[in-house]
Amino acid sequence: MNTPLTHAGAERRHFLKVSSTATAGLSLGFFVPERANAAETPQLNVWVEIEANDIIIIRYARAEMGQGSMTSAPMIIAEELDADWKKVRVEYATAHENLRTKRAYGDMASVGSRTIRNSQEYLRKAGATAREMLVAAAAQQWGVPASECKASLNKVTHAASKRSLSYGQLAAAAAKLEAPKEVKLKDPKDWTIIGKPIPRIDIPDIVTGRIKYGIDTQLPGMLHAAVAACPVFNGKVKSMDASKVENRRGIVKVLNMGEFVAVVADNWWRAKEALREVSVDWDVGEHGTLSSAAIMTHFKAGMEQADLAVARNDGNAPEALGKAVKVIEADYFTPYLAHATMEPMVCTAWLQGDQLEVWSSTQNPEGTLAVSAATAGIPQANVKVHPVQLGGGLGRKSPQDFTRQAVMIAKAMAGKPVKMLWTREEEIQHGLYRPASLMRFKAGMDASGKVDALHIRVSAPSILATLLKLPLPKGIDGQAVASFNDHPYDIPNTLVDYAQRNTNVPVGFWRSVGHSQNPFGRECFIDELALAAGKDPVAFRLDMLPNNEKSKRDRSILEAVTKAAGWGSKLPAGVFRGVAETEGYGSWTACVCEVSVNAKNEVKIHRVVIGIDPGYAVNPDNIVAQFQGSVVHGLTAIFWGENTIKEGRVEQSNFHDYRMMRLNEMPKVEVVIAPTGGFWGGVGEPAQAPLAPALVNAISAAMGKRIRSLPLKNHGLSLVKA
Amino acid sequence: MSVSDAYAPSRRRWLQHSASLGLAWATVQASSAYAQKMESGELKTLAQMISPITQGAKLLQQDVSISAPVLADNGSLVQLGVHVQSPMTVQDHVTHLYLLSQRNPVTRMAVFHMGPWNGRAEINTRVRLAGTQAVVALARLSSGEFRYAQADIIVTESACVDAS
Amino acid sequence: MNLARMQWPERIVAGDVVKVRLLVQHPMDTGYLQDLLGKMVPRNVIRLLTCKLGAREVLRVEPSSGLAANPLFEFFVRATETVEMHVEWIDDRGNRGEHKQTMIVLPTVS
């Protein structure tokens, strides 16, 4: 398929014009890549435009990487707008529009499971404001008070005189009215769209292959670039010999960019194959000897460091530990992890004079705009960032390292569009890895099994200090101690400290960041304490949760999930359960796993019961999908995920040695959605947190011995279909 | 004159002007609810940034213009230019120019001492910004009065930990 | 070792208000970053920088860790006569730096 990518906006010179009847041909509810009549459509505010034929265009200002907020966010606007969802189409807002309108769309980054919870208020207001304007327009036309008119399902009705007008009929007049300063938002009990399991609007196009991911970008005369950076991180090109490939058919240019080399060709296969035969002499600096063993030594040294940064210090943990009747200690370890998004890093850039267009699979289009402008050396107003669907983001596609590369190449090929695509090997070996982390737990118990002292020490790299170069005046990286410094348990003497141990391996945000590893350590250690106290793990946790407002939600999700899992009921012989509960990204989650482990150390996962209290569940079907997907991603990491370092470089390179879960290994996943209302919590990442500890607790129970590090393959464990 | 008398007039002025300062903070303050959980530092109020320097002296939000990108690609190197409308004569000139950060661990990014010999009250430099925040350029005039301007700068790379 | 560079327009006439661009080489270490050996790189920033035009101080800057590494300063001075620009700075460790450069100023055409 070679259809040119289209985009909304005035610039149409390189694309085929889509006729104005295009909306009729599009699947219902789907997003509009281009509207020929965009300039004439009445705009009620930056979020809502309504066509004369009653179709509502709702703007979506974040990225869509399979998390489904491209459907949920417009649902929120449609709710307050009292729109007929069947008549809603979604169109992207762009970073350049956002810049031009002084950020009328606000933050556009899809990170931190924040899209819904951070934007819900202004999205609701936008929908309500547009609704009020439509009602006012109808009231004016009829000469009746607005209070006598009601908006519902794309219509404004005046019951007393039995008159009604459609939004399409009212749009032009409404768009001329002044927006009300104050609007009243609906009570959640009156919601008719929010809370419904509405199918994602991009499903038909995904299923039929019409969807356009960044990797599908096609432009007339487009060139393709394959790149390779130094296999040892932070190395540079000393010299490059491209003589073997320079004059090959289809090879346009071979570029030495200092930090990487690029082959530009007329198709990507040629570029990639030629790149393999470019010989590069890399200057690896002092980092060519780094190994996983050396990194572990470095982390262990951190454990013994004096003057550690303190993240939490209640009471006097060292003293209480010294007096405790029983002391339990354990070290836990989690490895570096590459993201392995299905779509590798890809970015298309076209520099024409001092005008730049970029099509990037990015979670942060404003970041793309800023970095593109800086790299090209042009004003930000000259950059257009065209939105595309992402084939997975997972936190890897929020940083702009690959954008910079693409724009540098585009600059060198000035005038020609260039699509730069990483190989899988490049993606796995040039990641921004989840930091490996060494965690030490020490707890003190009294004779009755009550925990009254807890000391958690983390020795790990800091993403904030190294990737973002943020100052850490107290020395604490919140991600490194996430779920430790804010643990919910009533333990009067709690000390959490942190040794910042950076290495030459670059680190970044892996889905759920600190919550993808710290809860594993914490909730597994809590189980060790329950065992030592001779108590049931669920009862032990409930006992330790204080009886206050704050812990209400920890209790309620733990109870909801354990109830759904039938915790306490009899299990068949050889089947064991494990549990975990966590809070993160504004939501509360819990998980129960049922497993059996045979003599060959093969693990069968009989059930995964995983639940969330996100406050309000905007689209329950999407939450189920997100959680099922999180389990695939999570189990993959738990069983096999690790990136090891040898001679300064990552050893793994593709899916043969960085294994993904297979379809036939997938266990049954039951998702419990238990919204308690009153707040808006994130959904994209929280599921990672309780999964690993619940599973490992079950496996540890089955094996009669504690597992304290991931991945499980290193313990000889494998996964088989239950 | 008792201590409280000496204080009273300037304290009243301080309360008045800090109340008016609150209004200017609408855009950035709106995100302060999330600010408390942010990794990259709490957001200070305008009063917290400015009052220790002005100490109740007359303060007007005018005559100062900041040139900075709306979107900064990274927080380690952000261009920041400030120009103060001033004749820069012996009788009327800028004596100090303060670059203030809303979120950095150190609020006073830099202080520039100037005088009529500069001819033009304009400074350009490069700052580090610990995440999306407002920056304030505060000028002290030879009259003892202050002038200021504020600019919101989005540090795009720290979107992951900012909560704006 | 020249740790600073200063630039201004080539042709300056007395009375001109001249833009001076000063770039100083200095890491401006914040003190918040651990190096790869596990040691905190101690804070070391320029804490005072002055620029004199002849005998008169025309710029005094009190930087902080909030200024980017290799600090850049652009400022203005009234040119009166050919004079030596003398920049001096001192950092937290007590290291001093300086740079001298003569600014040629043509007399006003009467």
Image (cartoon, coloured by chain):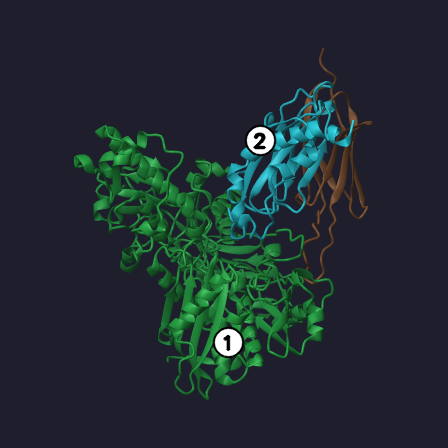
Q: Chain of mark 2?
A: B
For the residue carrying disc 1, how many other residues have a C-alpha within 10 Å: few (<14), some (14-19), or many (20+)?
many
Q: Chain of mark 1?
A: A
Labelled disc at residue A401: none
Residue position marked by numbered label 2 in the rendering:
B20
Kindly identify the residue that appears in the image at 72 percent across and 70 percent down.
Answer: A319
Count of labels in the image: 2
On the question of residue A455 being in view, the answer is yes
Q: Quadrant of residue A344?
A: bottom left
What colour do you see for chain C? brown
Distance from the alpha carbon under mark 2 to that under mark 1: 55 Å
User: What chain is colored cyan?
Assistant: B
Mark 2: which amino acid?
Ser
Task: Tell whether B163 sits left or right of B128.
Answer: left
For the residue carrying disc 2, how many other residues have a C-alpha within 10 Å: few (<14), some (14-19), or many (20+)?
few
Question: Horizontal and vertical percent for residue A151?
Answer: 26, 41
Mark 1: which amino acid?
Pro
Do badges 2 and 1 share one subunit?
A: no
Q: Quadrant of the N terminus of chain B?
A: top right
Q: Residue furthest top?
A: C110
What colour do you see for chain A? green
Task: Tell whether A75 sits left or right of B65.
Answer: left
Q: Residue furthest left?
A: A162
Judging depth in this view, the residue of A485 and A287 nearest the camera is A485
Question: Horizontal and vertical percent for residue C30?
Answer: 69, 50
Look at the numbered disc 1 and give the secondary structure of its residue: helix
On the question of residue A637 being in view, the answer is no
Labelled disc at residue A537: 1
Question: Horizontal and vertical percent for residue B152?
Answer: 55, 38
Judging depth in this view, the residue of C110 and C16 nearest the camera is C16
Look at the numbered disc 2 and give the secondary structure of its residue: helix
Question: Horizontal and vertical percent for residue A722?
Answer: 37, 80
